């Protein structure tokens, strides 16, 4: 059995046969919980993997992967009406440099967000 320490890409984890503890049934619970959610968990406790799973579940551009990624999981056997219904734009703030003066950090954040928006616009499908 392969164990992906630090692997936070749900698609890669599922496509490459890594072990995955199925918690996908909680997607329906998240939808029922409301529009504004906060995920508070300690470091290295699966927040990034959870968000990646949600990205793959809701992203319209990943609809053709749904069966391969979720088919044998609980949510794949009883998907919610919202699966693969949205365009998802991902921002990875770990890529933003937090060094330098406040203005440098603001510029790095601004540049990162602009790069994400440009990439999203360039590849809508």
Image (cartoon, helix red, strand yellow):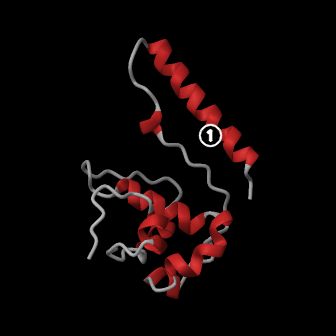
The x, y position of residue 59, in whole percent, is 62, 63
Quarter of the N terminus within the rendering: bottom left
Q: Residue at x 28, y 71 (%)?
A: 2
The x, y position of residue 50, in whole percent, is 41, 61
Q: Residues within 10 Å of mark 1 (few under 14, many from 20)?
A: some
The answer to whether residue 77 is left or right of residue 62 is left
**Front residue of this view, candidates 19 and 16:** 16
The answer to whether residue 62 is left or right of residue 11 is right
Q: Residue at x 49, y 53 (%)?
A: 36
- Judge whether 112 appears above or below 65 on screen: above
On the image, which quarter does residue 13 sit in? Answer: bottom left
On the image, which quarter does residue 107 sit in? Answer: top right
Q: How many labels were placed on the picture?
A: 1
**Front residue of this view, candidates 79 and 72:** 72
The x, y position of residue 118, in whole percent, is 70, 38
Quarter of the C terminus within the rendering: bottom right
> Judging from the image, what secondary structure is the residue with disc 1 in?
helix
- Which residue has dot 1 on it? 116
């Amino acid at each position: 059995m392969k164990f992906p320490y630090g692997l936070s890409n749900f698609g890669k984890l599922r496509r490459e046969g890594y072990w995955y503890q199925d918690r996908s049934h909680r997607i329906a619970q998240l939808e029922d919980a409301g529009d504004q959610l906060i995920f508070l968990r300690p470091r290295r406790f699966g927040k990034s993997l959870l968000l990646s799973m949600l990205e793959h579940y809701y992203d319209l551009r990943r609809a053709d992967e749904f069966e391969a990624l979720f088919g044998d999981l609980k949510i794949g056997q009883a998907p919610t009406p919202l699966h693969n219904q949205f365009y998802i734009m991902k921002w990875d703030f770990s890529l933003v440099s937090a060094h330098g003066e406040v203005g440098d950090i603001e510029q790095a954040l601004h540049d990162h967000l602009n790069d994400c928006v440009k990439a999203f616009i360039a590849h809508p499908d």
